Image (spheres, rainbow, N blue to C red):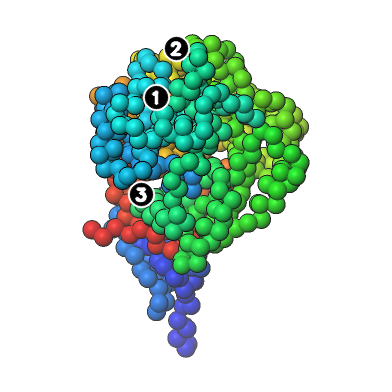
Amino acid sequence: MPPSPPRAPLTVADTVLVGARVRTLDPARPWAEAVALKDGRIAAVGDAADARHWRGAATEVIDLAGATLVPGLTDGHSHPLWGVEMATGVDLTAVRDLAGLRAELAAAVRELPRGGWVTGWGLDHNAFGDRPVHRDLIEDALGGAPAFLRLYDGHSALASGRALEAAGITGPREFAQRASVVCDEAGRPTGHLVEHAAMNLVLPAMPRPSAADRRARLLGLLREMAAAGLTGAHVMDMEDADAPELLAAIEADGPLPVRLRLAPWCMPGIDADGLDHLVALQRRAGRHWRIGGVKFFMDGTVEGGTAWLERPDCHGQGTDAFWPDPAAYTHAVHHLDRAGVRTATHAIGDAAVRHVLDTVELLGDPRPGARYRHRIEHIETVPDAQLPRFARLGVVASMQPTHTHYTRADHTDAWSRRVGAERAERAWRCRDLRDAGAALVLGSDWPIAHHDPRQVLATARLRRPAGHPEVAPVTPGQALTGLQALEGLTAHAALAAGEEAAAGRIAPGFRADLTALAVDPATAPADEVATAPVRLTVTGGHLTHRATD
């Protein structure tokens, strides 16, 4: 009998990953040891012995030395485009009181070039204690310099007197959305600007980064995100119309380190032509980016008094929607739904969450392909009666576990005091939503909180900052399991984007978006997950990060 011909390779791969514990999240094969990548896709998944059949002369073989390989981690709510401009100047995230704030500002003034502005970001409302946000609290530290300081929530800012003067803000203003220039009893601006329309009044007077600077900063940020293990992000903004051109310019030199899915904003006052423009934008895409959805705001923030609540907060505020006519919001969502466009709505307060669910329910029985087309962002407080509606209506819950860092277990923080103890006890109900059958995508909301997905994974389980066991957890009954947290950044993120047939699992034919960590993120202690070395990050088959140690 003649000898058998040599066995033909099943696949000649571009890259073969071996030496890994592969947690696939694929029910057909939950575990594997080797993965082959070809043309940006997963070509094969198998045992260690299978890998030799996938190699060709040009195949790169990477030994992961016992690391755990999981589907690529995706941040379900991030702002890299808006954030590279928002997170400029002095990093105020570590400031805890007014003395610390004034010290930071005084130091910034000493380094300020002639005619420059002091800018800052990440300022915690709790730094003001029981005092209202007011420019008088910082003017003496500024020495007359104009200053614009964004509070951590991204929905409010503090402007100095010189900044208000430069922007021509001398009193209250009227807006099409719920926004305000806060004024004292005499009608003089306090410097507290609430919501985007009010903050945007100052931006034309401020120095703006050049296109080259924006491009360099965005690319640097995306590389940092990839080094932390991210392969994708759901970008909840496209405020600048030139964002597609910016991304295309970066991709002209190579693929983006992180896959971006953008959702431009839809604001109150939009007409049918504006909605049709948003529909048309959905066709724009690049190699690793695309416009895929529309972002709405149904309310603002608790600390700013603009969250839409069923009952007023402790200051008698919070009873108004961001859209002065909530029915107009419903009309806009239905218009986009008819065109097959996905929507994501910022809804923090219980009334806001209810209205979004009501809006989706009015669409009727889910149409083919429409389940999980709509999602709600943040969901900071929600009563029991609304929980089962998410699963029944096919509405995705999108939450950011690290937002709990701005609250305290004893409810002495600004957020908890504002909503009251009853609502604070049902804060960030991640576990209750999962137990009620909801799809739950997790994210960071960078730059509101850090983009590192390992921190998100850890906090989802701990309900406190990782590495700080002395800090009491916030509503600990809402902790997720390690597997649930991982699904929130993988399988459920794919579901929320309508990409469950192409992403969120390690299976043949799926996108080659992969993250390798030194520990298993589903089973290792959460505090260890938060700092686990990232061995490898792969986006679309491209190695975007590789550990050198």
The spot of residue 460 in percent (x, y) is 40, 33
Labelled disc at residue 228: 3
* Any part of residue 88 in sight: yes
Distance Cα–Cα, label 3 vs label 1: 37 Å
Q: Residues within 10 Å of mark 3 (few under 14, many from 20)?
A: many
Q: Amino acid at mark 1?
A: Arg
Left or right: residue 275 compared with residue 36: right
Label 2 vs 1, first from the N-terminus: 1
Residue at (66% x, 52% y) in the render: 281
The front one of 481 and 219 is 219
Check the image and report above or below for 513 versus 176.
below
Q: Residues within 10 Å of mark 1 (few under 14, many from 20)?
A: some
Q: Which residue is mark 1?
A: 135
Left or right: residue 529 compared with residue 303: left
Label 3 vs 2, first from the N-terminus: 3
Q: Which residue is mark 2?
A: 421
Residue furthest left as drawn: 549
